């Protein structure tokens, strides 16, 4: 603005106006650039009133439970990557909320506890599953090592032998575990079909020495679960100074890696995927129960959530998610996983309650009971598959080769379920009738007459051990002949030694891995599931 113009400019702050009017008039008469500068100065002044001292704060990282588990998992040292430094001082891992072991190399646990009741066969009561009867923290748990309050009955470096276990059983079990360890794949799974390609983590080059007995690849998650149950049941976890620590670690990591967001283990490539999920869930739940590890807890919880999601309202399970129909076979496997979880929770609560337990669908036990009742012929004690009192299930193409009347597989599932759900085998007429049916069909290794049924032998062994008395003694002698004597003793563990031929009706699906894992679990009967009620072994 020129000087003469400024001299003629009207005074913006007239004496007869209040301050707001004078300020308004002054702003309107001021140049635009002067107004802009004034506003910027005012804004700057206001901002200086806020505390901006120090460096800009870094936003806090939000860690979900799932991310925390992944962070913990990343701390595990993969057994097949020896070049990684376990204790690299420059390797810093964020500390999430859930923190457990720092690696999955063999570890030594402290505060070990040996339960004197473990594996008892003296006829004294060891309690039932139902909370109405005193809780037994051992039933349903594979047992083994791990710091208190989980797992017991093993020596400090894993492995165990229950009192009363025949030497022949223990020797056969050790051979079976050696064979299973030899045929684990490098990624941690046991391949139902491709197991023959591996020996102690190395490819087998001599194709003339490949063992036979291939199953179907779609059952890999399921047979991996069974193989892990065989090691866990023998007292071997991913911890301890024993030869199977890395084997168990790799297997559990494989299952954890193939678990989908809904909690299901493995792909749902066929309707039978539900079997694989059930056995894999049992393994993961038992791994958590034996170690108390938050790594396995998260995976076990998601597995149980999926089990709850797939159950039919008021009843049980079959293929898929709430399919509407039910069957006794799938229900049996789901029961085992749920009961293991329930006993783990009872054990945690009875000790200190600091460890987080597992959330389970308590109403499922009522559904199991209702289904078993629906399938049981009360006059004869026989339990059906999808219809009351019918025989065991068979692949359609093998019905003639393996007659249903040669097996009482589903009756054994029903008897075991009743005992585990609180029925006393000494007082229950329907249990006595079921046991009588099984006593007429003891384990018999005869490839000619179709009597081999390893699934039946597994559940039958569990059930008859609970029944006890002469029924068990007779069954045990038959099992020693059929199971122990049929184990392969020839060649070496990279081929056949320690395994069982998949000669039963389901051998074509699960293969040699399935048959070997299941028979190994049979041999653990003296310490895997102690007696619920006061039945005796004589």
Image (spheres, rainbow, N blue to C red):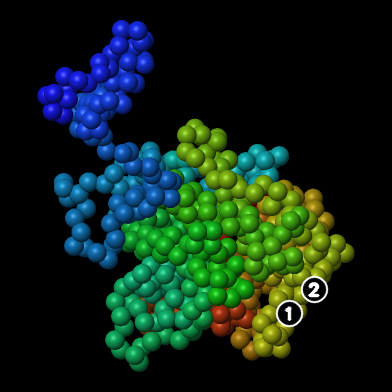
Q: Is residue 34 left or right of residue 111?
A: left
Q: Is residue 463 left or right of residue 115?
A: right
In the image shown, does 532 or 142 lie closer to the viewer? Answer: 142
Location of residue 471 by image quarter: bottom right
In the image shown, does 320 or 197 lie closer to the viewer? Answer: 320
The residue drawn where x is 19% and y is 55% is 85
Residue on which disc 2 sits:
390
Labels 1 & 2 near each other (Cβ < 8 A):
yes
Q: Which x, y percent locates residue 34?
A: 21, 29
Q: Secondary structure at mark 1?
A: helix
Q: Which x, y percent locates residue 60?
A: 32, 38
Rendered-image quadrant of the C terminus: bottom right
Q: Is any atom of residue 169 visible in this view? A: no
The residue drawn where x is 33% and y is 71% is 186
The residue drawn where x is 55% and y is 64% is 277
Location of residue 463 by image quarter: bottom right
Outermost residue, top side: 15
* Crowd rating for badge 1 (residues with CA inside 10 Å; few <14, some 14–19, many 20+): some
Q: Secondary structure at mark 2?
A: loop
Up-down: is 218 above or below 422? below
* Crowd rating for badge 2 (residues with CA inside 10 Å; few <14, some 14–19, many 20+): some
Residue on which disc 1 sits:
404
In the image shown, does 36 or 99 lie closer to the viewer? Answer: 36
Up-down: is 418 above or below 411? above
- How far apart are labels 1 and 2 at the CA level? 9 Å
Tell me which label, 1 or 2, sits earlier in the chain.
Answer: 2
């Amino acid at each position: 603005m020129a000087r003469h113009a400024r001299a003629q400019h009207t005074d913006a702050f007239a004496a007869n106006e209040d301050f707001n009017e004078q300020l308004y008039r002054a702003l309107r008469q001021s140049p635009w650039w002067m107004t802009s500068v004034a506003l910027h100065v005012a804004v700057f002044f206001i901002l200086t009133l806020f505390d901006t001292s120090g460096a800009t704060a870094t936003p806090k990282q939000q860690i979900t439970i799932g991310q925390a588990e992944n962070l913990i998992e990343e701390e595990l040292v993969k057994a097949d990557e020896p070049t990684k430094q376990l204790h690299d001082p420059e390797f810093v891992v964020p500390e999430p909320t859930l923190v457990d072991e720092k690696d999955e190399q063999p570890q030594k646990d402290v505060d070990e506890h040996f339960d004197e009741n473990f594996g008892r066969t003296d006829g004294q009561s060891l309690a039932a599953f139902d909370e109405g009867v005193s809780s037994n923290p051992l039933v349903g748990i594979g047992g083994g090592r791990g710091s208190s309050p989980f797992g017991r009955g093993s020596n400090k470096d894993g492995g165990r032998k229950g009192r009363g276990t025949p030497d022949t059983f223990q020797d056969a079990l050790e051979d079976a575990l050696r064979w299973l360890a030899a045929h684990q794949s490098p990624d941690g799974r046991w391949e139902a079909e491709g197991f023959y390609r591996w020996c102690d983590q190395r490819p087998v080059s001599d194709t003339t020495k490949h063992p036979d007995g291939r199953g179907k690849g779609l059952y890999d998650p399921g047979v991996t679960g069974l193989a892990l149950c065989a090691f866990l049941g023998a007292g071997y976890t991913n911890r301890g100074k024993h030869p199977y620590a890395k084997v168990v670690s790799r297997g559990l990591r494989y299952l954890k890696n193939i678990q989908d967001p809904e909690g299901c283990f493995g792909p749902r490539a066929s309707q039978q995927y539900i079997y694989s999920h059930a056995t894999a869930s049992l393994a993961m739940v038992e791994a958590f129960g034996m170690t108390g590890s938050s790594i396995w807890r998260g995976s076990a919880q998601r597995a149980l959530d999926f089990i709850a999601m797939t159950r039919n309202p008021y009843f049980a399970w079959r293929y898929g998610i709430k399919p509407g129909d039910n069957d006794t076979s799938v229900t049996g496997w789901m029961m085992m996983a749920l009961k293991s979880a329930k006993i783990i929770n009872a054990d945690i609560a009875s000790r200190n309650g600091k460890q987080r337990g597992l959330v389970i669908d308590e109403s499922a036990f009522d559904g199991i009971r209702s289904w078993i009742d629906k399938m049981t012929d009360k006059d004869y004690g026989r339990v059906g598959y999808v219809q009351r009192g019918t025989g065991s299930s068979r692949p359609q193409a093998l019905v003639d080769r393996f007659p249903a009347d040669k097996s009482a597989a589903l009756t054994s599932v029903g008897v075991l379920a009743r005992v585990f759900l609180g029925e006393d085998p000494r007082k229950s007429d329907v249990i006595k009738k079921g046991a009588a049916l099984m006593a007429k069909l003891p384990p018999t290794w005869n490839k000619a007459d179709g009597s081999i049924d390893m699934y039946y032998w597994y559940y039958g062994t569990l059930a008859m051990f609970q029944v006890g008395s002469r029924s068990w003694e007779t069954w045990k002698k038959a099992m020693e002949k059929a199971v122990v004597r049929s184990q392969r003793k020839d060649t070496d563990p990279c081929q056949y030694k320690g395994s069982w031929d998949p000669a039963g009706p389901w051998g074509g699906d699960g293969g040699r891995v399935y048959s070997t894992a299941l028979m190994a679990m049979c041999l653990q009967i003296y310490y895997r599931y102690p007696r619920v009620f006061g039945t005796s072994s004589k």
